Amino acid sequence: MGTDGTLDEALERLYRTGPEFGGRLSNHGPMAVESMVRRGHARQVHRWLDLYMRRLDERPRGGCPIPAVGWRSALGDPRRLGDWLAFFDREVTEQPWRAVLEVWWPRLVPGITAGATHGVIRTGHAVHALLAHEDGPRLAELGQALGYWAARWQQVPSAAPSGTSGPASALAGVPRIADQSADIDHRLGQLTGLSGWPAALAALRPAADAGQARDLLAGLTTAAAVRYLPNAHGSPVMLIHSATAPMAVLRTLPALPSTQWVVSLHAAWAASAAVTAAYAPAAPLPRHALPTAHRSAEETFALAVRHQDEHVIKLADTCLDVHRRTGCPDALAAVTRAIELIDEP
C-alpha cells in the first residue's frame, strides 16, 4: 500500500474518535500520523495507532445543529463539540475545502489558543495533507480539525506588531506570568494583567505585505524551535506548542488568500508568545549543559518515532522543517532534548 493509502486508512480509523480524551487532553493521532507518513515512516503508523487509540474516547454526537446564521453564540462552547464536528462535516462535503477555509479561517484565527493551540495545529496538518492530495478521508479530517477549533475557540489579549525586533529578539522579550502552578486556562488568564505583555507583543516588527508576513512567520517558527532547547525544562510538553502552532499557520498559508497572511502572522505570534509567557522557566540552561545535534535529520525523526510520544513526533516534524530551511543544528538538538525530558508512553 502506498503512503497516501496508509494515511487515509489511519484517518478513517481516527474519524470515529473524539478530538479530546481523558478530560481535556487533545487527540494527537491525526497530527502524528500525518507527520509520520510524510517523513517516510508509513510502515510504523498502524502499529503506533494500535497503541495510541486505546487511550481515546469516542467521537461525541451532536444534539442541536449549528445554524449557518447565528453560529457565533456557539463559538467557543465545548458543550457544542459534537454539533461543531457535524457542522464542518457538512461544510467540507458541500463546498470546496479552500472556500470553507477562506471563510472560516478569519473567524477562527482570533481564537488561536483553542485547545492549547491544538485546534490550529490539527488544522495545519490537515491542510498540509490536502495540499498534497485531496480525497474523502482528508476532507473529513479538515472538518474534524475545524470543528474542534470552533468548539474550543479561545482568545488571548493581543496587540498588533509595531516595533523593530525580529522574531528571536521579540520572543526573548516576552515576560513570564507570576503563577505557573495551574492549568493553561489559569495561566492564559493572567496575561490580561501581566506587566509588559502589550509592549512585548508590539515589539515584533510589522509585516508590510504578505511576503514579509510569511518570512516573519518562518522566522518565528525558527526562533521558537531553537528557544525550546535551553528552555524545555520549564514544561517539556507545553513549550513544544510555541513552535508547532506557528508552523501550522505557516503550512496553511498556501491555501489561504494572501490578504489573510498578515493577520495570520499576528495570531501565530500571539499564540507563541502566550505559550512562552505561560510556561517558560525562570532561566534557560547554559548551552554546555544541553545536547548537541550528532544525528542527521532523518535519524533524528526516526528516533522520535521510536520514542513514540506524540508530542516528540510533532516537535520533530517542525524542527526538521526549520533545519531544512536554516541548517541550524540546534533545531535537531531540540528534538533530542525533548526525548530526554518526555517519558516514553
Image (cartoon, rainbow, N blue to C red):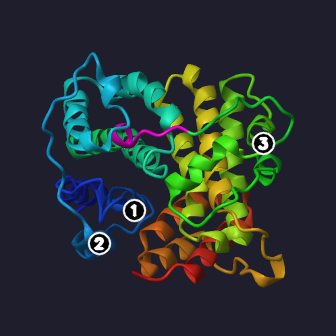
Could you say which disc has been placed on residue 52 in the image?
2
Quarter containing the C terminus: bottom left
Residue 123, disc: none
Which numbered marker is on residue 32? Answer: 1
Q: CA distance from mark 2 to mark 1?
A: 10 Å
- CB contact under 8 Å: marks 2 and 1: yes
Distance from disc 3 to disc 1, alpha carbons, whole Å, reads 32 Å
First along the sequence among labels 2 and 1 = 1
Residue under the image location 39 percent in, 28 percent down: 101
Label 1 packing within 10 angstroms: few (<14), some (14-19), many (20+): many
Q: Amino acid at mark 2?
A: Tyr
Secondary element at image label 1? helix
Ranked by sequence position, the earlier of labels 3 and 1 is 1
Comparing 332 with 64, the one in front is 64
Q: Secondary structure at mark 2?
A: helix
Could you say where residue 57 lies in the image, as x and y percent from the top left? 21, 62
| Res. 134 in view | no
Q: Is residue 50 magenta?
A: no
Where does the image place residue 292, in percent across and percent down from the top left? 73, 79
| Residue nearest the observer in this picture, 276 or 299 | 276
Q: Which of the labelled discs sits on residue 200, or is there none?
A: 3
Please provide percent x and percent y for residue 204.
Answer: 78, 38
Quadrant location of residue 275?
A: bottom right
